[in-house]
Amino acid sequence: MSARGDSKAQYQLYKLYAKAMLNVSYRMMRNVEDAEDMLQEAFTEAFKKLNYFRFEATFGSWLKKIVVNRCMNELRRRKADLQFFDDMQRFEQRTEEELVLPELSVDKVKQAMESLPGGSRMIFSLYVLEGYDHNEISDILQISVSTSKSQYMRARLQVKQLLIQQGYEN
């Protein structure tokens, strides 16, 4: 394939995935300029590593992982503070039924999520909005699965309380 063909294909991939990946990046970075920077870096990395793509997942999910990792690395570089909670055991004992979010509009959840501390917001976003499980989150953030679960549960409770305060009733 010629260099011109490669750039056309890359442009098509960019057009197809840029908006969705910008949303992922923005939810993590909380700033349009930073989100755009991370998006560009993620696409550059993806295009450089395209020969490593093994078709075990969709290109979109592979790219999303690169975007998330880029954002995480940048936030770590900035010494983003992940908040770890002392009361993990209390939250780990909750049943799965208690963890299910009631059906809400995504916009309301996103708005409530903005009030969460950085680490909790990130875990909540990765779990609820991006669909990662706690094992994947622990790998991405380099934290334990139990920490991911406890931070998610704490974030979920905070979001629920905020939604109730805003007039949402279960």
Image (cartoon, rainbow, N blue to C red):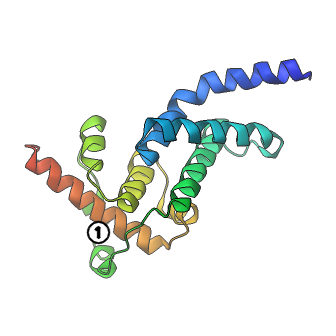
Q: Residue 81 at what x, y percent from top left?
A: 42, 66
- Where is 102 relative to 59, above or below? below
The reply, left or right, for residue 17 in relation to residue 85 is right
Counting other residues with Cα less than 10 Å from the Cα at mark 1, is it few (<14), some (14-19), or many (20 or more)?
Answer: few
Residue visible at 89% across and 23% down in the picture: 3
Q: Residue 64 at what x, y percent from top left?
A: 58, 43
- Where is 74 relative to 9, above or below? below
The image quadrant of residue 21 is: top right
The reply, left or right, for residue 148 in relation to residue 65 is left
- Where is 85 relative to 131, above or below? below
Amino acid at dot 1: Thr
Observer able to see residue 88: yes
Q: Using the image as rendered, state which of residue 70 and residue 66 is in the foreground.
A: 70
- Element under disc 1: loop
Q: Using the image as rendered, state which of residue 58 and residue 159 is in the foreground.
A: 159
Q: Residue 59 at what x, y percent from top left?
A: 67, 37
Observer able to see residue 97: no
Q: Using the image as rendered, state which of residue 151 and residue 36 is in the foreground.
A: 36
- Give the quarter of the figure containing the N terminus: top right
* Residue tagged 1: 95
The image quadrant of residue 166 is: top left
Q: Residue 15 at what x, y percent from top left?
A: 62, 21
